[in-house]
Image (spheres, rainbow, N blue to C red):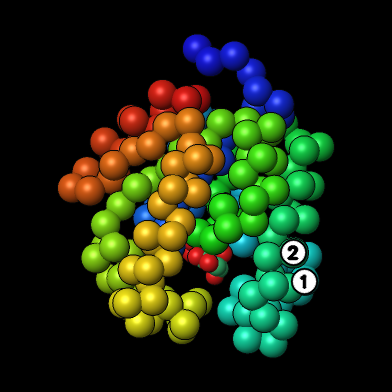
Amino acid sequence: VLPRRGCDHIFFVGFLGAGKSTLARNLGQMFKRRYVDVDRMVEQARGMSVSAIFSHEGERSFRRLEKKALASLASKRSLLVSCGGGIVETPENILLIKKMGYCVYLDGDIEDSLRQIRRSDTRPDFKSPEHAGNLLEYRRPLFQKAADLTIDIRGKSFTEVAYAAAELL
Ligand code: S3P
């Protein structure tokens, strides 16, 4: 059993399409812990969808809102938190995550992410495989810096990933 850290939250980070929200939501049900999604918090705070914020106000505005939503979790306890794929690009966020709890990085393949991205409408600017690939290379060390536990999700079933993540719960 790990010593409590900060608010005792568990954060899930990883590239778009890694399955962070599904995992956090399911673990929340299994372990009776409340689950929140930082993207949904931003949407509620701004009254707009993430893609609308990106197209009308730009990424910088989104990142500001994202940081604020993350910081607001300091007054809560013991949450499972699904983070947007770009959360680690704001350096303060990595420190906030470390202060508030533990972090699981779902480390996957760019191919799987691209498949997911093609299916979603949230990030039209990610559709170029080259751009998405470069972004993943840039973010990987940042994810690793934030993480207390890295799970290589390649070829793993949902149950296997959930078992590995449960180590921190
Ligand atoms: C983003 C990923 C999205 C969302 C926003 C930006 C990114 O979250 O926060 O569109 O920069 O990778 P998911 O990773 O949950 O899709």
Q: Is residue 53 above or below residue 28?
A: below
Mark 1 belongs to which amino acid? Arg
Question: Where is residue 51 drawn, in percent x and y?
Answer: 59, 79
**Which residue shows up at 41% across the image and 52% down it?**
140
Side of 16 where 51 appears, left or right: right
What element does badge 2 sit on? helix
Side of 84 where 154 appears, left or right: left
Mark 2 belongs to which amino acid? Leu
Q: Quadrant of residue 131?
A: bottom left
**Which residue shows up at 79% across the image and 47% down it?**
72
Question: Where is residue 101 drawn, in percent x and y?
Answer: 62, 31
Q: Is residue 45 above or below residue 1?
A: below
Q: Which residue is mark 1?
A: 46
Q: In this orientation, which residue lies closer to the viewer: 65 or 20? A: 65
Outermost residue to the bottom: 56
Q: Quadrant of residue 94?
A: top right
Question: Where is residue 151 drawn, in percent x and y?
Answer: 34, 38
Question: Where is residue 127 drawn, in percent x and y?
Answer: 37, 81
Q: Which residue is mark 2?
A: 65
Q: Residues within 10 Å of mark 2 (few under 14, many from 20)?
A: many
Q: Is residue 77 above or below residue 81?
A: above
Q: Is residue 93 above or below residue 122?
A: above
**Which residue shows up at 68% across the image and 65% down it?**
63
Q: Are marks 1 and 2 in contact (CB under 8 Å)?
A: yes
